[in-house]
Amino acid sequence: MVGTVAIGDRRVRRLGFGAMRVSGARTAEGVRDRALAVELVRGVVARGVQFLDSANVYGYGQSEEIIAEALAPYPDDVLVSTKAGFEPGKLAPGQASLPPLGRPEHIREECIKSLRRLGVDCLVHYQVHVPDPAVPYAETVGAFAELQREGKVRHIGVSNVTLEQLRIAQELVEVVSVQNRYGVGNRTSEPVLAACEEQQIAFLPHSPLDRTDGAVGEKLARIAAAHGALPQQVAIAWLLQHSPVMLPIPGTSQLSHAQENVDAAWLQLSRDELAELESAAAGTVQT
């Protein structure tokens, strides 16, 4: 697996697992199966994955519960991360995302729930899931800082932030990671990534296959065929080679797909292939 990256005082291999969909693990008949979900989590750890990314709203709390069932007591080399900042609940018809909820009292309540579901006294890595336009960002981050002072949280990361929001957070806490939407076809967070590289902050790209249709998708498919690989494996390999602070967290509800994602860590793209993907995505870069 390709190197390690620091998350505060911990180091983990540079390919993690996004646990948003673990509670959706299903049998061949399409029935949700808790045992398969547990097997999925144990399977990715068995393959050498050391960083698992969850959140209070993933599976309405089930993601955290499944991780605890699968791994507790947690291996010393495994880091389980979780988040708060969205309002828990089920999506309404036509609703694309849960509404943000960054009030300090809500963050505290959700922290206590995550501690209980994960079966720990301290969250090693707790992330501000999303800025809430109705709450000053400093107030939301301040709630995380207070939890850290109380010993309920060890390290703090931020997610879905602009460069300015990252700076606001850094005035209040040591930010050890940033999780933003990023991939070969969507590089609007390039300035944030550059700041992370400069400061040696881990960057966790989510939704790496976003906007990989058109020219980007065609080049991913062509390069994948040349390596006997899958396009999504090429997209993950590109992330790993694009930046040394990158920690991709591809997620799935199927162990077979998780195994394919892990295999991408050994896929080495040539300079020409990297340049081809860079040129295909040039229009998505913001400076």
Image (tube, grey):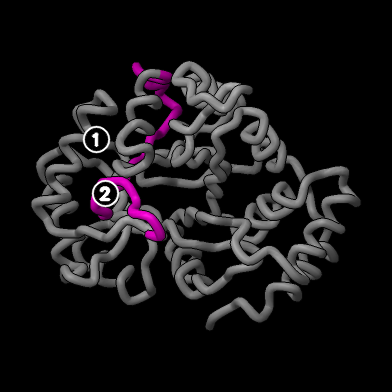
Q: Is residue 179 visible?
A: yes
Q: Which mark is residue 84?
A: 2
Whole-percent x, y for residue 244 in the image: 58, 55
Question: Which residue lies at the image location 27% right of the left edge and 54% below the top edge?
Answer: 86
Left or right for 133, reference 40 = left
Depth check, front residue: 233 or 199 = 233
Question: Which residue lies at the image location 25% right of the left edge and 47% below the top edge?
Answer: 88
What kind of residue is marked 1?
Ser
Magenta residues: mostly which secondary structure? loop
Where is residue 78, by image quadrant?
top left
Q: Is residue 45 visible?
A: no
Which residues fall within the magenta stretch?
Answer: 70-95
* Marks 2 & 1, CB-CB < 8 Å contact: yes
Q: CA distance from mark 2 to mark 1?
A: 9 Å
Where is residue 46, by image quadrant?
top right
Depth check, front residue: 118 or 215 = 215
Left or right for 257, reference 70 = right
Q: Which mark is residue 114?
A: 1
Give the class, few, some or many, for how many residues have Cα within 10 Å of label 1's Cα (few <14, many ≥20).
Answer: many
Whole-percent x, y for residue 262 in the image: 65, 36
